[in-house]
Amino acid sequence: MQDRYDVIVVGSGAGGGAAAYALVKAGKRVLMLEKGGRLPRDGMTLSTLVVFREGRFSNKTEWQDGHGKPFVPTGEHYNLGGKTKWYGAALLRFSAHEFEADPAFQCLGWPFGLAELEPYYAEAERMLHVNRFKNEPELQAVIDKIVQDDPAWRPEPLPLGLKPEIVDDPQEAKHFDGYASVAGYKGDSEQNFILPIETAPNFRLILDKEVTGFLHAEDRPDAVEGVLCTDGSYFFADKVVLACGAMSSPRLLQDYLSLTGLDRTLPGAALVGCNFRMHLNSALIVFSRFRDHDVLRKTAIFFNDKHPHSTVQCLGWLDGQLLATQLPAATPEFFSAMIGSHALGFFVTTEDGSSRDNRVVSNRGHRPMLDYEFDRIKPSRDEHEACIHAFERALLHAGFVGTSRWTGLAGTGHAVGTLVTGRDPASSVVDSEGRVHGMTGLYVSDGSVLPRTSRVNPSLTIYAWGLRLGRRLAAG
């Protein structure tokens, strides 16, 4: 007879790992299914050529944009720990006002305020070893010049999920943002949430197991009782937690609703996949007189009240080898090494408002679609451009010249919003408890529930949501 679990968690990223941890610690029998496998620990995940030039660990599945043009979302990663293995570990809380609606900026409101997530934020910060590091000398000199010329730019220490000892390991310190740590210095879902429960008797982890659909009660497609996998295997549970990320979770649900006819009766069916957001992110590279750069560097974040939905973060280590991955293959090595030795990086992030037309579509059997246009979120586009220009001016006055580039549709590392949470089933997909409106047994614990992206990285908020969801499922 097939085993039945209390909860099946589909996916092992921030939300899935946090929810599974909370459930297992509460004594629930949990099965976690992960589409990918474990990352190697032989150093390949710290290799610029392997990670960036070859893209060995990135998604290879081809998508199409809203005009039918193919592209590959390289911001997606299918491995134990999901995107958290590769992120830059910037772990910031959303501000209180970022839980509220902002109609002028097309921002939806949360069904609750900051106070509801605060204890889970605190727990996630403890578990992920969130620290603030002192700025290294060269970075501090740059910051001093910027602030001296334009005090509107307000630098603050950047909360990072990094253990302090990383600064004594230059190889890891130079390769934590966009790379997967081998030594375990970076806080991520696998290291900090899954490994602590992996040997628990009430937890089972199956890797390389892709979920393709849901099982339901007889004549009750709205009552989910398990999952079906691509290899024909299936598993039963009282509850299923969908945690595949904002690019994958809505496609699974779209396919299920279409196959069962629930797309015609479920209140929020038409909203599944809508309200896609990914931040407007642009890399800003400047060139300085410095040659021997600081090692960690990603230790500060700038705020500016003139651009209230935006921030500017310092990027981590840059060198010629990393820059060469973004230059034509024929670029001479000596040239990329020369410019890399003088390069400093910044990351301009602007919250993108919501549009129902910005969406993910499964297109079952064909290329999935990401339809995302700036013209639908003009306030976000305008502020992003203004923030870039303002920071470029500040850098120029401080003696630095450079260029900026939008990360593009492929840069889906901050993708959220496609199964948005809310109280009203007519305007949201998931309720404030994480349950899909109009269904029983199906919950969501990933970035797709976020009504807003805020002006900072969403990872800590996804961890906090996962911890809260796990605790509430365990208690209920």
Image: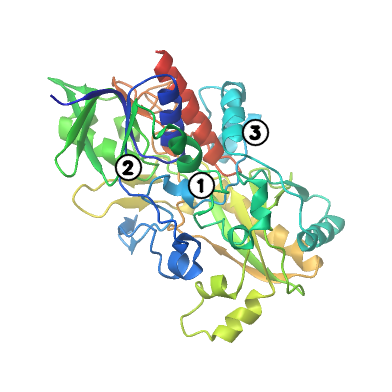
| Looking at the image, residue 411 lies above or below residue 264 | below
Q: Position of residue 181 (x, y in %)?
A: 52, 53
Tell which of 196 and 210 is nearer to you.
Answer: 196
SS label for mark 2: loop
| Looking at the image, residue 290 lies above or below residue 436 | below
Front label number (2 vs 1): 2
Tell me the quarter of the picture where residue 243 sits.
Answer: top left
Q: Quarter holding the N terminus?
A: top left
Tell which of 396 and 162 is nearer to you.
Answer: 162
At 39% across and 39% down in the image, what residue appears?
418
Q: Position of residue 428 (x, y in %)?
A: 40, 28
Mark 3 crowdedness (10 Å alpha carbons): few <14, some 14-19, many ≥20? few
Task: Count up the numbered dots.
Answer: 3
The label shown at residue 42 is none
Find out whether the residues at labels 1 and 3 contact each other: C-beta distance under 8 Å.
no
Residue that badge 3 annotates: 95
At 43% across and 57% down in the image, what residue appears?
409
Amino acid marked by disc 1: Ile
Residue that badge 2 annotates: 34
Tell which of 169 and 310 is nearer to you.
Answer: 169
At 64% across and 67% down in the image, what residue appears?
285
Q: Position of residue 268 (x, y in %)?
A: 33, 28
Tell me the quarter of the picture where residue 12 sits.
Answer: top left
The label shown at residue 377 is 1
Label 1 to label 3: alpha-carbon separation: 21 Å
